[in-house]
Image (cartoon, helix red, strand yellow):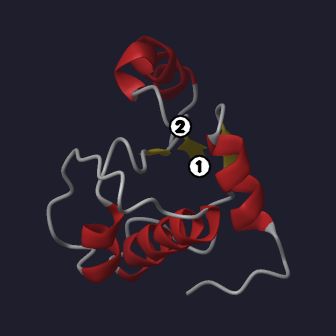
Amino acid sequence: MLVVVHDIFHSFFESVEFYEKILSSFSNTKIILFNYPGKIFLRKILSDISGQAFTSYDPDNIQTNEEIAAALDTLLNFLSDNKRITDDDKIHLVGVGYGGNIASCFCNPNYLFL
């Protein structure tokens, strides 16, 4: 399974063909494309993961790397709880641009999620 944490100033729409090629080239491949502030309103996801995410930007509500990593953790736990991913799925985490900072924070063994 490929988990991609995108850069804050881009969307996945520019890369759709690339991800489609990956999906068509490798059988049983799963890809999670994770957008975050600038793209989605994290407070909504953290408070109600089953609710609808929407595009928003609020300069008075800037999330830290830890909060965004916690949202990714919440998403992965939600997918696991709902049997969309399993413990057998090998995860390859890729951060694009600023998403690399979020991916690094997510992988930090000393970090305890919120």
User: Label 1 amino acid?
Assistant: Met
The residue lying at 55 percent from left, 34 percent from top is: 7
Residue 55 higher or lower than 19, as above or below: below
The residue lying at 58 percent from left, 29 percent from top is: 26
Q: Which mark is residue 6?
A: 2
- Can you give x and y, in whole percent of width and height, for residue 71 in the image? 46, 69
The residue lying at 53 percent from left, 34 percent from top is: 27
Identify the secondary structure beneath mark 1: loop
Which quadrant of the view contains residue 2?
A: top right
- Can you give x and y, in whole percent of width and height, for residue 48 in the image? 23, 79
**Residue at numbered disc 1:** 1
Q: CA distance from mark 1 to mark 2?
A: 16 Å
Which quadrant of the view contains residue 79?
A: bottom left
Quarter holding the C terminus is: bottom right
Considering depth in this image, is 29 or 55 the residue closer to the camera?
55
**Mark closer to the observer (1, 2):** 2
Considering depth in this image, is 42 or 78 the residue closer to the camera?
42
Q: Residues within 10 Å of mark 1 (few under 14, many from 20)?
A: some
The residue lying at 84 percent from left, 77 percent from top is: 109
